[in-house]
Amino acid sequence: MDLLSLALFGIGAAAGAIGALLGVGGGIVMVPALVLLVPLPFTQAVGTSLVCVVATSLAGSAVQFGRAGIETEAALELQLYAAAGALIAGLAAPWVPTRILFFAFAALLLFTAWRSWPRRGAAPAPPPVMRRATLAGTGAVGAGVVATLLGVGGGVIFTPILHLVLGYGFHRAAATSVYIIGITAGMGAVIYLARGDVALAAAAPAVLGILAGSGAASRLAHRVEAAWLKRGFAVVLLYVSARMVVRGIAGD
Amino acid sequence: MTDPSRTAARVLRVLLVAAVAAILAGVFLGAAPLAGRLQRAGLWTIVAGPFLVLVIVSAAKPRTRWFAAGTLALALIGLLLAR
């Protein structure tokens, strides 16, 4: 392995660990890393990142399914809505005003970060029932749209839907989100792989790093306090939100 | 009856081992013509994983079977339209 491959392995391991702990895919870290470090063209960076997101999902899900930590029924229902959103976005992509979308997405993430931050004496989460299914379904369609347009898994939306809207505990919400993003990112990854828009030389070390980082973090996830995970998640949301604002201003 | 979640976990572990073996073999073969094919096979194994698990975990209940069928149908439509 050369120095670049080792760097990609390290970035992959960090992205995989963050992804497994917080229920996100790490695409938002991988895309800029691949564009700036390798450097790859944006389309190839998105394709390679999507494969990396699926790898994060697979490694995390392998551990969480064994531990029965995933809400299968909720995951399958949200996946269906997200798949519909991904298809709509795929068809509508050429006509979508991306600048407005970036600003709206950034605002949504800021609000979610504020809601996710743990508070002293806050009321416990409502019981995990699908009684707010309409809101959750709409959110999942939005996650599918965002995932397809931005080349990410949509975990930054699925974890809050499962935790804040459907009322699952944060650990369970993050574990379920890790599984859902495998399908949303997988839908895009299949297309990019078939087109040859995945850089094998970059994907191979990054995926190996992700599998190592994600597998280790999934085993540690239940030992980390939910409050710390929520703080970490809020920080990730703020970072992603800032990136969205920058891209919205740049207009790309 | 076997718990679908545990079956999914076992299937995922087998897929991960197969994918890592293929990618590692590709990395160590370097510039050989087989290296690219092995790495691509490893990545396809990873991408196929969530869809295989979708079929396994949805098989237990009729309601979840419909969700899985809908998701797979939408994925197929997306793939056909993209090509």
Image (spheres, coloured by chain):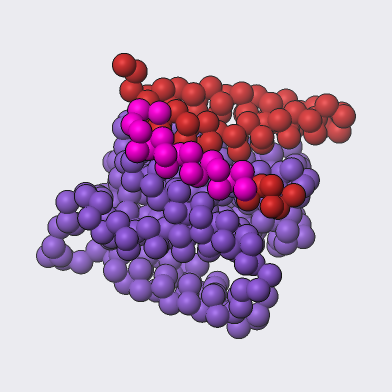
Which residue is depicted at the point 53% across and 62% down? A145
In the picture, measured across the screen, residue A249 lies left or right of residue A239, that is right
In terms of secondary structure, what is the magenta stretch mainly?
Answer: helix
Quarter where residue A20 is shown: top left
Residue reaching furthest to the top: B1
Q: Which chain is purple?
A: A
Nearest the eye: A89 or A192: A89
Task: Please report the bounds of the magenta region as a residue range.
Answer: B59-77
Q: Is residue A131 visible?
A: yes
Q: Which chain is red?
A: B
Please provide percent x and percent y for residue A149: 60, 63
Quadrant housing the C terminus of chain A:
bottom right
* Residue at (37, 37) in percent of width and height: B64
Nearest the viewer among A120 and A116 is: A116
Eyeballing the image, is A2 above or below B15? below
Percent across and percent down for residue B71 are 50, 44
Side (left or right) of A13 relative to A138:
right
User: Residue A127 at x, y = what percent?
Assistant: 17, 51
Q: Is A101 within the magenta?
A: no
